[in-house]
């Protein structure tokens, strides 16, 4: 397997461009199943998860064309089989997003129970109960969700807990349902808003996205359109933390700083000078060591769980003691054990990590356990003395486009070393 080889201790400086958001691209690709004419999506990042979703759509007979600059055309009208097989779904949890569109447009779906990062249970029961409320008959057999329905009926759905993919799946299904659907306790993430924007451009009637109550008035049909995916706020935050952890100065362009309020506030608290414009954000540490910051993850607009691991790396070399509380996923501290290999001083108490910052980390071989853990270890390697090899980086390729090339633009000494192929 490939690994990233990092020589740490270099203060980063410069500018990079944010890619399109993975977590918006995946549901928007799935939304192509709802249309009877082609959907053309721009600003799609070239990531392993995106490739998996495209392969999944192709396996179902959907026409998918990838053009220059990762413009992707999805022709859902060519679907031949509404089956999402285990060998693809097991690698990416977001594959569950084809369930709602398949059921709404084609009346049937056979979708494998999903896999993805090993960061917690993340049950799909909220997807299933929501679709059942809309009239679907659903069973789970031999590891597959088997769903059938005539035309779905609008319903009032109150989600027990905030779920991004659950909100997205039910919102997509409701666009072709008969009557009005109201989703309460809906996720408010920018990626949900982006999906709603695409659906409306396709002819849907979705209102309230970005609030905790989304209203969808069903339509008889949806058509294709051209739509550009929003910038990736988590990638943006990761590169800003890379600047802060190394005491450097980094600017990210082609992004949406208004989606990063909680992250930017914590970077200011860590001692960074933070500046923003309409489509850019920058941090400048003026060569200083960061100050420890406490983190408590929460659904948007709170502090994102997808930035928790990156701030754990920052706190590992910060001045002071920090407490990180993970409230979203029960198994998202595995990167902490690898940070210890680099010299971090921390202890874990249930869903809380207490980190005593140290003046310096020391390079060592480490192993990534999930997507954001990979980013955390790369960030720690950037500031560690000596050499850090981050192994199992197929995780990072699921969510970061050309991360080593972008970090080299900022002055980092990082390169990919190909591993043996099996």
Image: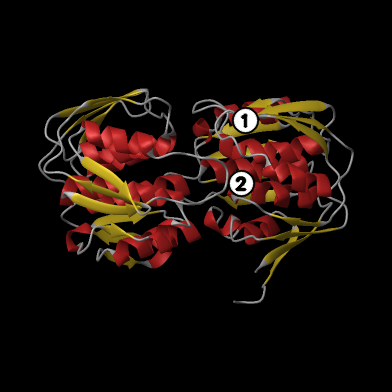
Residue at 76 percent across and 48 percent down: it is: 338
**Tag 2 secondary structure:** helix
Please determine whether, in this image, residue 360 is positioned above or below residue 355.
Answer: below
Residue 369 can be seen, yes or no: yes
Q: Depth check: give the residue in front, 154 or 249.
A: 154
Q: Depth check: give the residue in front, 181 or 142.
A: 142
- Decide which of tag 1 and tag 2 comes sooner along the chain: 1
Please give left or right for residue 66 compared with residue 341 in the image: left
Q: Which residue is mark 2?
A: 372
Q: Give the numbered dot on residue 326.
A: 1
**Coordinates of residue 28 in the picture (x, y in percent):** 34, 48
Whole-Å distance between the Cαs marked 1 and 2?
13 Å
Residue at 85 percent across and 30 percent down: it is: 319
Residue 229 can be seen, yes or no: no
Which residue is farthest front? 142
Residue at 64 percent across and 61 percent down: it is: 405
Q: Nearer the viewer, mark 1 or mark 2?
A: 1
Q: Give the numbered dot on residue 170.
A: none
Q: Depth check: give the residue in front, 110 or 390.
A: 110
Q: Quadrant of the C terminus?
A: bottom right
**Coordinates of residue 95 in the picture (x, y in percent):** 39, 52
Q: Depth check: give the residue in front, 398 or 14.
A: 398
Confirm or deny contact between disc 1 and disc 2 (CB under 8 A). Answer: no
**Coordinates of residue 112 in the picture (x, y in percent):** 36, 54
**Coordinates of residue 326 in the picture (x, y in percent):** 62, 30
Residue at 71 percent across and 25 percent down: it is: 294
Q: Quadrant of the N terminus?
A: bottom right
């Amino acid at each position: 397997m490939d690994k990233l080889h990092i020589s740490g201790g270099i203060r980063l400086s410069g500018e990079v461009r944010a890619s399109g958001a993975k977590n918006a691209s995946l549901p928007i690709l799935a939304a192509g199943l709802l249309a009877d004419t082609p959907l053309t999506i721009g600003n799609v990042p070239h990531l392993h998860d995106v490739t998996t979703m495209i392969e999944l759509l192709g396996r179902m007979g959907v026409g998918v064309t990838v053009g220059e600059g990762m413009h992707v055309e999805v022709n859902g009208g060519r679907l031949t089989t509404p089956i999402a097989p285990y060998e693809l779904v097991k690698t990416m949890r977001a594959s569950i997003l084809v369930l709602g569109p398949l059921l709404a447009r084609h009346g049937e779906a056979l979708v494998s129970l999903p896999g993805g990062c090993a960061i917690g249970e993340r049950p799909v029961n909220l997807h299933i109960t929501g679709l059942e409320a809309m009239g679907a008959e659903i069973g789970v057999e031999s590891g597959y969700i088997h769903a059938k329905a005539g035309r779905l009926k609008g319903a009032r759905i109150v989600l027990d807990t905030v779920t991004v993919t659950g909100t997205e799946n039910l919102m997509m299904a409701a666009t072709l349902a008969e009557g009005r659907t109201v989703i309460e306790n809906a996720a408010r993430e920018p990626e949900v808003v982006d999906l709603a924007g695409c659906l409306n451009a396709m002819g849907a009637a979705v209102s309230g996205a970005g609030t905790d109550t989304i209203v969808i008035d069903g339509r008889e049909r949806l058509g294709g359109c051209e739509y550009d995916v929003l910038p990736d706020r988590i990638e943006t935050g990761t590169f800003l933390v890379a600047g802060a952890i190394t005491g450097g100065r980094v600017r990210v362009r082609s992004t949406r700083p208004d989606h990063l309020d909680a992250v930017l506030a914590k970077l200011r608290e860590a001692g960074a000078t933070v500046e923003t414009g309409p489509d850019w954000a920058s941090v400048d540490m003026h060569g200083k060591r960061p100050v420890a910051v406490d983190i408590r993850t929460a659904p948007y607009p709170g502090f994102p769980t997808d930035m928790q691991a990156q701030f754990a790396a920052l706190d590992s070399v910060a001045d002071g003691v920090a407490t990180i509380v993970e409230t979203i996923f029960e198994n998202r501290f595995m990167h902490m054990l690898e940070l210890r290999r680099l010299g971090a001083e921390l202890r874990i108490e249930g869903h809380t990590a207490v980190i005593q910052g140290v003046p310096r980390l020391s390079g060592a071989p480490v192993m990534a356990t999930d997507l954001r853990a990979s980013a955390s270890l790369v960030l720690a390697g950037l500031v560690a003395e000596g050499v850090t090899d981050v192994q199992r980086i197929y995780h990072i390729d699921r969510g970061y486009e050309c991360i080593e090339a972008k970090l080299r633009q900022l002055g980092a000494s990082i390169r990919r070393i190909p591993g043996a192929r099996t």
